[in-house]
Image (cartoon, rainbow, N blue to C red):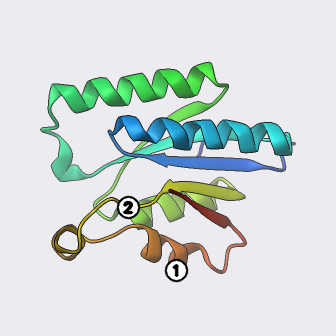
C-alpha cells in the first residue's frame, strides 16, 4: 500500500472519500491544505471486499471525484479492506501521512450500530503516530 510521494515533501495530506458528490468539499479542502503547506495530497477510497456489486451510479460518482482530485493536483489511490479505519490508518502510517481529512458522518444512529463508524476508530489507530485528523462538516 505504499504510494509514491516526493521524498522531500514534508506535508502529506490524505483525503478520505466515499461515493458521494458531497465529497467534493473534502477534495477542495485537501487541495487547499496542500497549497498552504507546500505539500502533496492524495484522495483515498476504500473498497470493502463485499462492495464489489456497487451500482453504476456510485462508480460514476467515484470516477468524477477522482477526476476532480487529479485536476486539483492530487493523486488517487483505491485500497481494499474489510475494516475501513484500519486500512486507512495502515496506509497513512506506511506513507508518512501528516494530515487526514474526512467528512463528518451522515449516518443515523441505527446505521452506525449496523455498519459501524470510521472516524473514532481511525482516531484511535493514528493517535500515537502524530497524524492530524480534520473532520469537515
Marks 2/1 in contact by CB < 8 Å: the verdict is no
Where does residue 98 sit, x and y in percent of width and height?
72, 58
Q: Badge 2: few (under 14), some or many (20 or more) residues near its Cα, within 10 Å?
A: few
Q: Residue furthest front?
A: 137
Where does residue 40 sit, x and y in percent of width and height?
73, 39
Name the residue: 33% across, 59% down: 106
Q: Mark 1 falls on what kind of element?
A: helix
Left or right: where does residue 36 sit relative to residue 78? right
Q: Which residue is mark 2?
A: 105
Sequence order check, earlier mark of 2 and 1: 2
- Marks 2 and 1 sit apart, C-alpha to C-alpha, by 17 Å
Left or right: where does residue 58 sit relative to residue 44? left
Q: Which residue is mark 1?
A: 124
Q: Is residue 67 above or below residue 101?
A: above
Image quadrant where residue 73 sits? top right
Name the residue: 37% across, 61% down: 105
Where does residue 11 sit, x and y in percent of width and height?
79, 49
Where does residue 109 sit, x and y in percent of width and height?
23, 74
Amino acid at each position: 500500500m505504499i504510494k509514491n510521494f516526493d521524498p522531500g515533501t514534508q506535508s502529506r495530506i490524505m483525503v478520505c472519500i466515499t461515493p458521494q458528490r458531497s465529497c467534493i468539499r473534502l477534495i477542495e479542502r485537501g487541495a487547499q491544505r496542500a497549497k498552504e503547506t507546500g505539500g502533496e495530497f492524495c484522495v483515498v477510497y476504500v473498497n470493502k471486499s463485499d462492495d464489489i456489486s456497487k451500482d453504476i451510479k456510485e462508480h460514476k460518482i467515484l470516477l468524477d471525484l477522482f477526476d476532480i482530485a487529479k485536476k486539483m493536483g492530487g493523486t488517487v489511490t483505491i485500497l481494499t479492506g474489510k475494516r475501513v479505519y484500519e486500512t486507512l490508518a495502515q496506509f497513512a502510517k506506511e506513507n508518512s501521512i501528516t494530515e487526514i481529512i474526512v467528512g463528518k458522518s451522515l449516518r443515523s444512529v441505527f446505521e452506525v450500530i449496523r455498519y459501524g463508524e470510521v472516524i473514532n476508530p481511525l482516531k484511535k489507530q493514528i493517535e500515537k503516530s502524530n497524524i492530524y485528523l480534520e473532520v469537515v462538516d
